[in-house]
Amino acid sequence: MKRVRIRLSWLQPARLGGSTQVAGLIRSHGAWPVGLVALVLWSLLPASGFSQAVQTPQAGDLKQLLEAFKDPPPECRIMMRWWWFGPAITEAQLEREMQRMREGGIGGFEIQPVYPLAMDEEATGLRNLTYLDDEFLKRLELVARRARELGLRMDITLGSGWPFGGPWIAIDQAASRLRVERVSVPAGQQRVKLPAIDQGERLLAIFRREPADGSGAFEPLALPPAAADALRLSPPPTRQVEVWFFIASRTGQQVKRPAVGAEGFVLDHYDAAALRHYLAEVGDRLIKATGPYRPYAMFCDSLEVFGSDWSQDFLEEFQRRRGYDLKPKLPALVVDTLPESRSIRRDWAMTLTELFEDRFLKPLRDWARRHGVLLRVQNYGVPPAALRSHRYVDLPEGEGWHWRNLSPSRWAASGAHLYGVPVVSSETWTWLHSPAFRATPLDVKVEADMHFLQGINQLIGHGWPYSPPEAGYP
């Protein structure tokens, strides 16, 4: 049997009218039988409809397809995350870097405005624009137009830094958590000072635990009047007890690595109103700035909403979804106080996942579809996205190539397979030979191969830093 040695590039999504047709990657490092190559390549060809009869590929078709793989079109090439530091960007340098990408065989980029590397300097002309101000949006419009003219795919991060948030998010829409305060009360003491309740917080429940050695049961106590600064234990304890306070609180997390003007609280991913407000302040303005040159996809970077395990209406939503009242069972979220404690914690986690899907992921995808763009998401971490959450993602994305554990890349590929999404990307080379500038071309290739083996078929290099010539070589 005749064998040929081929190296196939990656195929990325291509829009067909109002729908999207996507095909996955095949990469070969060995020799494949010609017949098998023909069948595989033929399976990647577009079909005009599902009812069309399967045809046997002819030799001419295979030759033509192999020729196309030698010089794949821009939309079938690797992409890069394009960091706009500051953003201290100029029209001339943006044009220059897009030209360099195109000349280097890169098929597109994802715009990610991040923190400044230097302060404004009049002598050198360095000036950091404010995220989403008129000058920034003007440059975004230029990039969108030129990317289309150059045949480069453009994705946009739906914000600056990560997770979503910024100055548009007030404390009452910031990421939420359940705060638990424990106070040890000696025998005979009746007055217990209440913990401070800050802006954006609310006291949910109080429990008395006696004895305080970890073996006692929890007794719910009535909430004191709103103006009170302490509660009174009755009857007074005859031995040391504990009083537990459960408070609907906020994490206080700030957006990581934000550009100038994008600093602020991370939004509550379980609050639909917070997402609507954010999309109106950020997403709609980004879309409007691109005009007729809409991005191919909007990107949601790593969730990483650390410690976010609550929402302000969580008790009401829990009862509606799970069918019982969580409030008297709140201690079971912290310690095994009941035989069904593990089941309660499972229900709590399931409710968080549902709120994330219903109030963040699904409305975010619906917003993207209304604007005619796809949604690309790194759908893992906190909030606790489930594998099923990928049903609301057009383009799943992972990161990491670790072979001996369930990496985010495997997670994303699994979600893509589960819901029949042929293209799944990965944030690639993020930690390759850290610190930077030590990696060899072989290192780059090996990590790419590891991603391919885990089901990834589109590489998004991490990354391409905006860097004018006067910055010099690192």
Image (cartoon, rainbow, N blue to C red):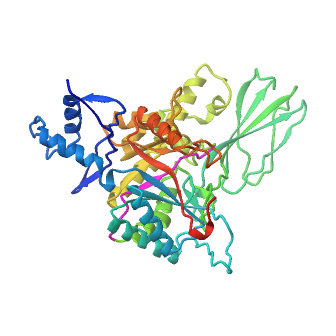
Q: In the image, is 345 to the left or to the right of 24?
A: right
**Rendered-image quadrant of the N terminus:** top left
Work out whether 393 lies above or below 330. Answer: below
Q: On the image, which quarter does residue 458 sit in?
A: top left
Is 294 contained in the magenta span?
A: yes
Is 108 colored magenta in this rendering?
no
| Percent x, y of residue 313 | 55, 47
- The quarter of the rendered structure image containing the C terminus is bottom right
Residue 16 appears in the picture as rendered: yes
Q: Position of residue 38 (x, y in %)?
A: 19, 34
Q: Nearer the viewer, residue 418 or 360?
A: 418
User: Is 370 positioned to the left or the right of 199 in the image?
Assistant: left
Where is residue 44 drawn, in percent x and y? 23, 41
Give the residue at the far bottom of this rendering. 122
> Looking at the image, which is closer to me, 230 or 149?
149
Count of marks, rendered view: 0
Range drawn in magenta: 292-306
Residue 196 screen position, x and y as percent: 77, 50
Q: In the rendered view, would you say 276 is above or below 441? A: below
**Does residue 149 lie above or below 182 as drawn?**
below
Residue 426: quadrant of the picture: top left
Q: Residue at x 46, y 69 (%)?
A: 96
Majority SS type along the magenta span: loop
| Residue at screen point 61% across, 70% down | 470
Of residues 18 and 382, the one nearer the viewer is 18
Is residue 2 rendered to the left or right of residue 202? left
For the question of whether residue 386 can be seen, the reply is no
